[in-house]
Amino acid sequence: MAAPVQSVTQSAKERLLPKVKNVVPVASGKGGVGKSTVSANLALALAKTGQKVGLMDADVYGPSIPTILGIHDKPSMANDRLVPVEKFGLKVISMGLFVPANDAVIWRGPMLHKMVQDFLGLVDWGELDTLVVDLPPGTGDIQLSLCQTIPLTGAVIVSTPQDVAWNVAQKAIVMFDKLNTPILGIIENMSHHVCVNCGTKEDIFGTGGARRAAGVLSIPYLGSIPLETSIRRTADEGDPVVHSHPESASAKCFFEIAQKLTAEMARRYEKGDEKKVPVKFGPAGQPQVEIEWNDGVKTSHSARELRFHCPCASCVNELTGERKIKLEWVPQSMTARAFHPVGRYAVQIVWSDGHNTGLYGYDFLRKSI
């Protein structure tokens, strides 16, 4: 009997978040750009449009979402699952709800990865239109774990106008691109300041840098947010400006951004997945690895050749790029026993010789060896 073809259409997102339509991380290349304040107000603005919205605070080392939303309650348990705290119509989970205010989280990569998986799989998010994920700044373990665990609708990048902030923000864009995660748009925070006394507009950090960069990179520009005391004050008070002062000029900026983001998510849904990702692998146990892609293309690879080209550190010298194994060492009878997709960018293959530590990037598999 022929070995079955392994379908990857039942994605990790469908297993972990079966009732969540969109997962949108909000990221920044560096800290201090107001990413968490933007995340909270953006989530509230999306909810004001009638969407069912969740907010996952993945900034483990500096969780500020509970403070911004004025949450003091702890998540409860029901049917062995965490029930997120609800505030202002949002379902919220954060490490800040589990760790005392004056305590610190000191975790290495494996613990961070476990936290991401638990926040996705053990939290009872229920039915959501959008789950906004407030990421920590940079391009570290949590970002990688999130992209590895579930396919994401797309990321939103927050930057301030000055070149030094934008240069770092581009690193986040490069990271998401390498992990096959679309960029839904860029938000320029602290774009300008208007004096409350005289009405003079001051470009304290410059202005328009994110808009210009979005044009150069062909990435949607979602809008700008002014540097206003009311945004900072309402966040410190635990009642963000979108909820406390929905008619204010700054709140309207968030509403406009939410509308553009919703339109961009809908556009991408109608247009289909632009990234070339597999929908089927197999059959297992055969000398050829057949891959069917989301654009209808089918590719075939020699199992022996793929095993030889394993990219893991056991098979490749990380410094020189030279192979540590030779093709003649790989048995002619080599086959793939199982395929485990990793996010939207790679697959882990379990080989008949027991080797399973290599992650084969989809870009690599799309090309002929």
Image (spheres, rainbow, N blue to C red):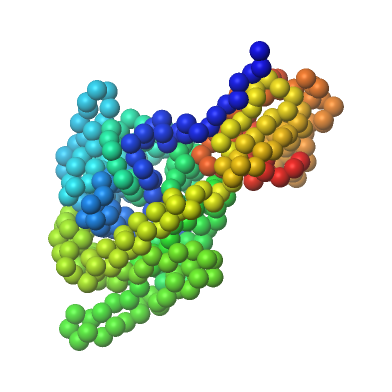
How many numbered marks are there?
0
**Image spot of residue 58 (x, y percent):** 36, 44
**Figure quadrant of the N terminus:** top right
**Image spot of residue 287 (x, y percent):** 74, 24
Above or below 352: residue 17: below
**Figure quadrant of the C terminus:** top right
What residue lies at 20% left-to-right and 40% top-to-bottom?
85
Residue toward you, 4 or 363:
4
What residue lies at 27% left-to-right and 27% top-to-bottom?
81
Above or below 3: residue 137: below
What residue lies at 26% left-to-right and 79% top-to-bottom?
194
What residue lies at 44% left-to-right and 72% top-to-bottom?
211
Q: Is residue 123 visible?
A: yes
Q: Is residue 351 visible?
A: no
Residue at the extreme right of the image, as rendered: 328
**Image spot of residue 200 (x, y percent):** 26, 85
Residue toward you, 201 or 181:
181
Above or below 226: residue 102: above
**Image spot of residue 49 (x, y percent):** 24, 56
The image quarter containing residue 102 is top left
| 114 sits to left or right of 256 | right
